[in-house]
Amino acid sequence: MEAVSRRAAARATPPPTVVEIGDVRIDIQARQVHAGDELIPLTSKEFDVLAVLAVRHGAAVSRQQLMDEVWGDAYLAISRSLDVHVAQLRAKLRRPGLLTTIRNFGYRLGG
């Protein structure tokens, strides 16, 4: 059993600390986002939403998973808060198609 655990741990890759999608660079440890040469000022929650999507870039992330990871399991507010933060991210990043809405499911960052 221990050998199986060791092999599984060895295969697990740590989440990336920097994610680059096109000309957008997301530094998760420094909590900074650059679009082109411009530093994009984000609120704490905007960055948290973007970071959850960034470590899974290219994959679909459900609304519930985003809400749980950013606001916590006990968050009971309406999911409209997530929509507002995503809209603000899209406006600040000015990169059409970077954040894709997956109807009746959630969001995807990048292709």
Image: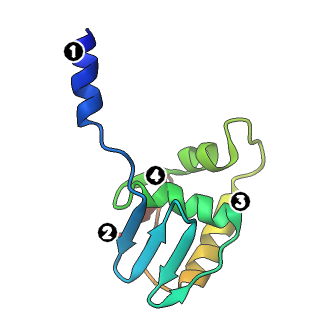
Q: Nearer the viewer, mark 2 or mark 3?
A: 2
The residue singled out by tag 3 in the image is: 80
Label 1 and label 2: CA atoms lie apart by: 37 Å
102 lies left or right of 3: right
Q: Nearer the viewer, mark 1 or mark 3?
A: 1
Say which residue appears at 61% left-offset and 58% top-offset.
48
Q: Earlier in the sequence, mark 2 or mark 4?
A: 4
The residue singled out by tag 2 in the image is: 111
Q: Earlier in the sequence, mark 4 or mark 1?
A: 1
31 lies left or right of 102: right
Label 4 and label 1: CA atoms lie apart by: 32 Å
- Which class describes the residues within 10 Å of circle 3: few (<14), some (14-19), or many (20+)? few
| Quadrant of the rendered image containing residue 22 | bottom left
Identify whether 74 is placed above or below 4. below
Label 1 and label 3: CA atoms lie apart by: 46 Å
| Quadrant of the rendered image containing residue 6 | top left
Q: Earlier in the sequence, mark 1 or mark 3?
A: 1
Q: What is the three-letter code of the residue carrying label 1?
A: Ala
Label 2 and label 4: CA atoms lie apart by: 13 Å
